[in-house]
Image (tube, rainbow, N blue to C red):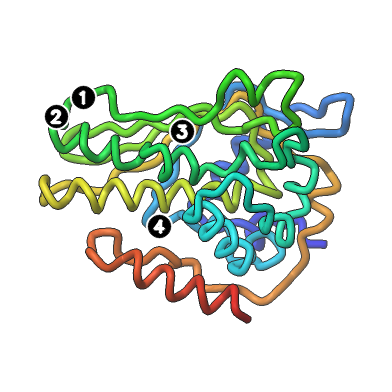
Amino acid sequence: MVTNPDLIFTPGWRHVYDRFIKEAYTNARGFKEAIGFSYSFDPRMDHCMSTNTSLFELRKAAAMYFWYKHADQSDLSIIEYFDEYKRCIDEKNNKFNSNYGYYAYTLGGLKNCIKKLADNPYTRHAMFCINNMYAMSDASIDKLCTNAIHFFIKNKMLFMVVQMRSSNFITLLPYDAFMFSVFYAHVYNGIRKKINDLAIGNIKMQVASLHFHANDICKIKQTEEIDGNIIGDMANNNWCIFLEDKLLKAIQK
């Protein structure tokens, strides 16, 4: 087991972890938890929380990326890579509410944000909701962790605000941070076609409950490290092609 944060998190995430540990308390269920926790990270430099493969496995990140891209709520393939999703299948409809690609791609969330910001860089309407009343009802097993995603342009920089109901710092946040960065890259590259001097801002996270269990830390081991620059140059119009080539190689291993 590895407990030294310097060996677990990349420098940009180490300070987030340190502040979380200072603010968190241990609840009756054995979770270390911080309520109403906010932080930010650079989607270009810090989309990879850890180069430790026991915390962030590129093959699993690739599986989540293509699962989101296919945006099919009835696609159950994600459970082959993430045990956490096995308990989230909505048995009544045999689907996942938690495929964020459905909201980002199928329902046009990202495309709509690009259009709104390209038409009016000062708008506060560039956002899409993910969580909903059904997902949080007793009828649903799959409780959505992310509420909404917003995009803003301030001082010629693109910012993204993610509001989350719940987030596990160790088991799922590394993959969420990666996918949120991918969403950011889509919008950034799309807007730059009209606002070519747009600079990269950051992703601001607002989390109602940020937590992890002691058992989650115990699973982290000393492993080989991966290259932390996965997304590459977001300003390159072919960024998505380069990214998918890298992810396809990872998932085919």
Separation of marks 4 and 2 at Cα, in angstroms: 28 Å
Q: For the residues labelled 3 and 4, say whether their Cβ atoms are less than 8 Å apart.
A: no
- Helix, strand or loop under label 1: loop
Looking at the image, is mark 3 or mark 2 earlier in the sequence? 2
Circle 2 residue: 120
**Residue 54 position (above or below residue 93):** below
- Helix, strand or loop under label 2: loop
Question: Which mark identifies residue 74?
Answer: none
Quadrant of the snapshot with the C terminus: bottom right
The structure residue drawn at horizontal position 49% and vertical position 67%, both measured from the top left corner, is 228
Circle 1 residue: 123
Report the amino acid beneath label 2. Answer: Asn
Q: Give whichever of 139, 250 is nearer the camera.
A: 139
Circle 4 residue: 45
Q: Position of residue 237 (x, y in %)?
A: 22, 64
Looking at the image, is mark 1 or mark 4 earlier in the sequence? 4
In this image, 7 relative to 202: left or right?
right
The structure residue drawn at horizontal position 57% and vertical position 44%, both measured from the top left corner, is 99
Looking at the image, is mark 4 or mark 2 earlier in the sequence? 4
Q: For the residues labelled 1 and 2, say whether their Cβ atoms are less than 8 Å apart.
A: yes
In this image, 236 relative to 225: left or right?
left
Q: For the residues labelled 1 and 4, say whether their Cβ atoms are less than 8 Å apart.
A: no
Q: Position of residue 2 (x, y in %)?
A: 77, 61
